[in-house]
Image (cartoon, rainbow, N blue to C red):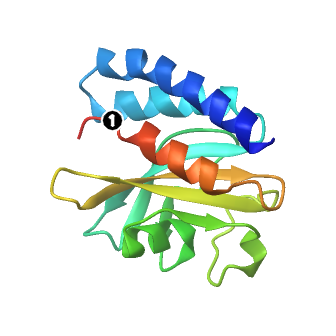
Amino acid sequence: MDKEKKRGRYGRIYKQLQELVPKSDDTLAQMATMVAVLYHKMDYYFWCGFYRRYENGNKLIVGPYQGPAACQVLEGGGVCLESVRQQQTVIVPDVEKFPGHIACDSRSKSEIVVPLKNDSGEVIAVLDIDSKELDSFDEADREELEKIIELIQR
C-alpha cells in the first residue's frame, strides 16, 4: 500500500477510534476495541494485539488480539521485549534477520511494535503487529500507530 493511501486509511481509523475508545475507561476494553478496528481495516495485518508487562517487565503476557493463536508469554528476547527495553517503536522488515526473534507463527515475515506508556513514561504494554509480507511497515505506520495508541487512557 502506498504511503498516501496508508496515511488516509490511518486517518479514518483514528477518527473512528477517537469516538469508540473513550466509551469505556477500562484499558483492556480500549485495547480490544483498538485491535479489532486496526486488524479489520488494514489488509496487510496478519496479527494485531497487545502484550502487557508482567513480572517487572522481564516477561510479557498476551492481551487482547486478533489473528491466529498467539504466544501467551514472551520472555528472554524478541521484538516486543526489545521495544520495552528501548522504550520506542521497533520496525523489523524481515523477522528472520532479527536476533532472538520469537516466532509465534512461522507465517509472520515483518513486524512493528509500538510501546504504550503510562503517565510516568514507563512502558506498560506494547502493540504488536505482524504481516505475512516482508517489509510491510514503514515510518508512516510508526507515526500513525504512535498517534493512535495515545488514545488509550492509562
Question: In the rendering, at what x and y percent does residue 82 appear?
Answer: 48, 74
Question: In the image shown, does 40 or 140 lie closer to the viewer?
Answer: 140
Q: Is mark 1 on a helix, strand or loop?
A: loop
Q: Which quadrant would residue 39 be assigned to in this image?
A: top right
Q: In this view, does 141 lie above or below 112?
A: above
Instruction: Indicate whether 3 appears above or below 24.
Output: below
Which residue appears farthest toward the front when viewing the image?
A: 4
Q: Which residue is drawn at 58% across and 22% down?
A: 12
Residue under label 1: 152
State which quarter of the image contains the N terminus: top right
Amino acid identity at mark 1? Ile
Q: Residues within 10 Å of mark 1 (few under 14, many from 20)?
A: many
Residue 141 image point, x, y percent: 61, 48
* Residue 70 is at least partly visible in this image: no
- Residue that appears at 77% across and 70% down: 94
Q: Where is residue 73 in the image (x, y as percent from the top left)?
A: 48, 61
Is the C terminus in the top left, top right, bottom left or bottom right quadrant? top left
